[in-house]
Amino acid sequence: MSINIQDTIKAIREMVPIIDPEDDYLTIAAAEEQMAMTHDMRQRDVHDAHAKVKQLARALEAARASATRPSTIPSAEEHAALMNDLDATRLSLAKAINDAESALAGKEAELARLKEETRTLESSDPAAEHELDATALRLAMYKGLGFEPIVDKDGRITKMLVRAESGDVHCVMFDQNKSDDEFAQLLWKVASA
């Protein structure tokens, strides 16, 4: 099918009064202006969105940093272990304090008892409470030195048993012919033999 050029020219000439280029130009210009305004609005929206994204990213990073456990703070497991150790230490210290308080109470009771005993002893006179028999003490001292007096039924010393350094036992008779000094020298002589 071929198109006749003459028909085409005729159709174009008939359409010339219908086509108003100024009207089309104004429509195209208005469309371009609308597109430019829409483009500018979209650019502003994109710029605002980028600014908001940057702001949110900074807030996210700050939240992440505050939520992250610093290296100076122990981990949850280390913290639990430390708390267990501190609890064990607290319990052992409480037991030690309890034991020390018990010991202190015992020592305070003993101190009170000893103070009372001291007060009682200081207020008493043992010499007055006990009558000491000087004769019995002298006899015990003489026996310790190796001299044992023998008395008659009247209580007078009639002879003295003397244990010598060698272990021998000698008997010295007391008669009225010698003085006390002579008897003392004789007794020491026999004891040192």
Image (tube, rainbow, N blue to C red):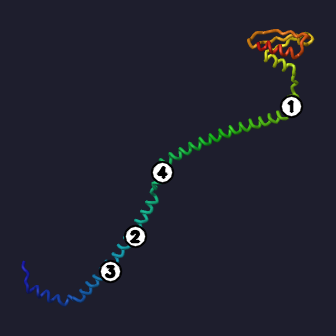
Within 10 Å of the Cα at label 1, are there few (<14), some (14-19), or many (20+) other Cα atoms? few
Q: CA distance from mark 3 to mark 1?
A: 124 Å
Q: Residue 57 location in percent, x, y? A: 40, 65
Q: Quadrant of residue 45?
A: bottom left
Q: CA distance from mark 3 to mark 2?
A: 22 Å
Q: Residue 90 location in percent, x, y? A: 59, 44
**Closer to the N terminus: mark 3 or mark 2?**
3
- Residue extending furthest bottom? 17
**Closer to the N terminus: mark 4 or mark 2?**
2
Between residues 92 and 83, which one lies in front from this camera angle? 92
Indicate the amino acid at tag 1.
Answer: Asp
Discs 2/1, front? 1
Indicate the amino acid at tag 3.
Answer: Met
Give the residue number, with chain letter if any, for mark 3: 37
Residue shown at 83%/15% (left/top)?
Answer: 185
Between residues 65 and 136, which one lies in front from this camera angle? 136
Residue shown at 83%/13% (left/top)?
Answer: 186
**Closer to the N terminus: mark 3 or mark 1?**
3
Q: CA distance from mark 4 to mark 1?
A: 72 Å
Give the residue number, with chain letter if any, for mark 2: 52
When the figure is inspected, residue 45 is found, relative to residue 18, above or below; the finding is above
- Label number found at residue 125: 1
Indicate the amino acid at tag 2.
Answer: Lys
Quadrant where the C terminus lies? top right
Discs 3/2, front? 2
